[in-house]
Amino acid sequence: MLKISVMAPAVLALVLAGCAQANTSPAGSNSQAGGAPVHVASVGQTLTYPDGLAVSVTKIETREFDQGELDALAAQGDPSGEFAADVSVQFVNGTHSAVDLSTTDVGLAYGPDATPAVVGFADAVSDLFGVVLPTKSHSTPCEFVIDPAGLGAKHEVQVTITPAGYPSVVFTGTIS
């Protein structure tokens, strides 16, 4: 059984949009393709797997890209979007062995159509790679490109994190 606990008061007002059919209950479990369980938690909560690995989305902030960043994104052929969603992810290794984060998937979907966001810059997720030793923690930012035109009235957001060898967890929230 997974343990979900609140890391901080519900002070985190997300700054960007979300997903259709988002389960915004504090904790839950669904299934993803292939029958693997998907666990649901709210932004600001910590999900702890049975072996002791804990993961959380501590905050999501948005900001407008500056012109240099917009030019770099266009040069990379990335989709248009004037805003970045900066997602802070934290891992705490409560297991008895090192955990390799290099194959962890982190994704963001927003708006009523659960529009998948694109990673902004490769170096924005470079801190995700590496090994977390037992009893140690690791926090990393992940940056995504979003299009404000895709935000819905509810401003829901869904961050999916899948550490290698673990079921996915979906962190949901809203923005003001």
Image: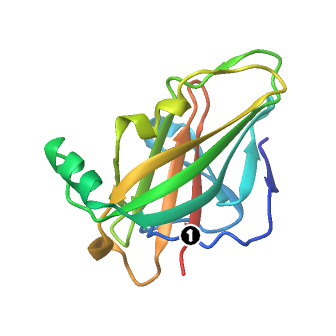
Identify the residue position indicated by label 1 in the image. 14
When the figure is inspected, residue 134 is found, relative to residue 91, above or below; the finding is above
When the figure is inspected, residue 129 is found, relative to residue 108, above or below; the finding is above
Left or right for 95, reference 128: right
The answer to which image quadrant residue 82 occupies is bottom left
- Which residue is pictured at 53% across the width and 75% down the height? 175
- Which residue is pictured at 54% across the width and 81% down the height? 176
The answer to which image quadrant residue 115 occupies is bottom left
For mark 1, does the 10 Å Cα neighbourhood hold few (<14), some (14 to 19), or many (20 or more) residues?
many
Circle 1: residue type: Leu
Q: Nearer the viewer, residue 176 or 34?
A: 176
- Under tag 1, what secondary structure? loop
Left or right for 27, reference 21: right
When the figure is inspected, residue 33 is found, relative to residue 70, above or below; the finding is above
- Which residue is pictured at 59% across the width and 24% down the height? 165
Q: Where's residue 6, x and y in %? A: 80, 59
- Which residue is pictured at 42% across the width and 68% down the height? 20
Q: Where's residue 125, x and y in %? A: 46, 37
Q: Nearer the viewer, residue 159 or 27?
A: 159
